Amino acid sequence: MTVLVTGGCGFIGCHLVWALHDRGVRTVVLDNLSTGFDWAIPSDVTLVRGDIGDGRLLDRTLREQQIDTVIHFAASSVVPDSVTDPLGYYGNNTGKSRTLIAAAVRGGVKTFLFSSTAAVYGNPAIVPVREEAPTNPVSPYGASKLMTEMMLADTARAHDFHYAALRYFNVAGADPSGRCGQSTAKASHLIKAACETALGLRPEIEVFGTDFDTPDGTGVRDYIHVSDLVEAHLLILDQLRETKTNLVLNCGYGRGFSVLEVLAAVERAAGRQFPIRYSARRPGDPASVYAATEKLHEVIDWQPKWNDIDAIVGHALAWEKRRLGKS
C-alpha cells in the first residue's frame, strides 16, 4: 500500500502522516505549503510540493509513486474567510477536489478518504447530530465540503472506487510525543487561541455570547483530540480496503464542552488566569453542537485515548510552549 496524503503538512495531515510512518506504511505527501510546514512530517517521507489543482502533477505523482490510496486534507478551512471569499473557497475546496478525484479515477486509485466537516449540517435542529440529519450548511466552507461529498458519492456509483467522508467536529490537541501540532499563523480555533492567550501571545480571548440556552450560557461544541481522530482514520482505512464499501461518518466524542469549560481547562493547564472579553453572539452560531457517534463505533473498534478536555488542552499547550522554546 502506498498512500498519497494531500495537505499532509497541515495540522491534521501531519499527524496522520506520522501515524502512517509509525505503521511502516509507504507515504507520499502533496502540499503547496501555503499553510503547512515541511518540517512537520518525517524527513524520510516523500514530499511533492505542488497543488491538487494541477492535473498533470497529480497524474505523474500517482503513476510514478504507484499510489493506490488517497487521503485528502488539502483545503481552505476558515469559516469567516469563506463568507468574504466564497468563490475562492469553491475553487480551492470543490473545484480542485474535482481535479483530484478525476486524477484518482484515471490513476486506478480505488480507496479515498476525505476530510469533511460537521459544518455540512449548518445549525442542526436536533443534537446530538446524526449522519442522516439534513445537510444545510450556512457558510461557503461547509457548502464546498458538502459538494465534494456529493462528487465522491457520484464517482463511487460510476466507477470501481470506494470512499469515506469523515465529518470532523472540533479538532484540537497535539501529538502527545511533541512531534507536531497546530502551527498555522492566526488560527482561529478556540483552544489554540486560548493557549496563546495564556502564554501572552494574545492580549485577551474573546467569548461570543453568554446567553445561549446552555448550562453556563456559552456555546457548547464537541472537541476531539487530533491523535484520536488520526487513529480513527487508520481503522476506517483498514475497513474501507477490506469491505470496499462507502462511508459517511461523524468524528467526535459525542459530548460537548462549553466555551467557559474550555477556558477553565486552559487556565488549569497554564496555572494562571488570563483576560477574557465578553461580546455579543455572532450571527448564526448555534447554542450546542455535538456528534452522534454510534455509527462510527459500529463500523470500527475505536477506543479513544484522549477524550478528556484536560488532556486535549494539556497537549495543545505543551505544543505552544515547545514552539516558544519553553518546554
Image (spheres, grey):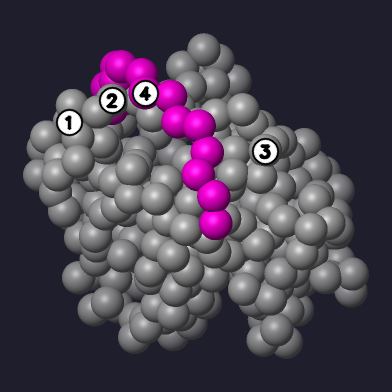
Is residue 233 left or right of 176 when viewed as pictured?
left
Q: Which of marks 2 and 4 is in front?
A: 4
Residue 209, disc: 2
Residue 212, disc: 1
Residue type at mark 3 is: Gly
**How far, Cα to Cα, is label 1 from label 3?**
29 Å
The residue lying at 73 percent from left, 79 percent from top is: 21
Quadrant in which the C terminus is drawn: bottom right
Of the image marks 3 and 4, the number of the one nearer the N terminus: 3
Q: Relative to 85, is 305 above or below?
A: below
The residue lying at 36 percent from left, 19 percent from top is: 279
Front one among 143 and 231: 231
Of the image marks 4 and 1, the number of the one nearer the N terminus: 1
Q: Provide the residue span drawn in magenta.
A: 271-286
Q: Which residue corresponds to mark 4?
A: 278
Is residue 5 left or right of 282 when viewed as pictured?
right
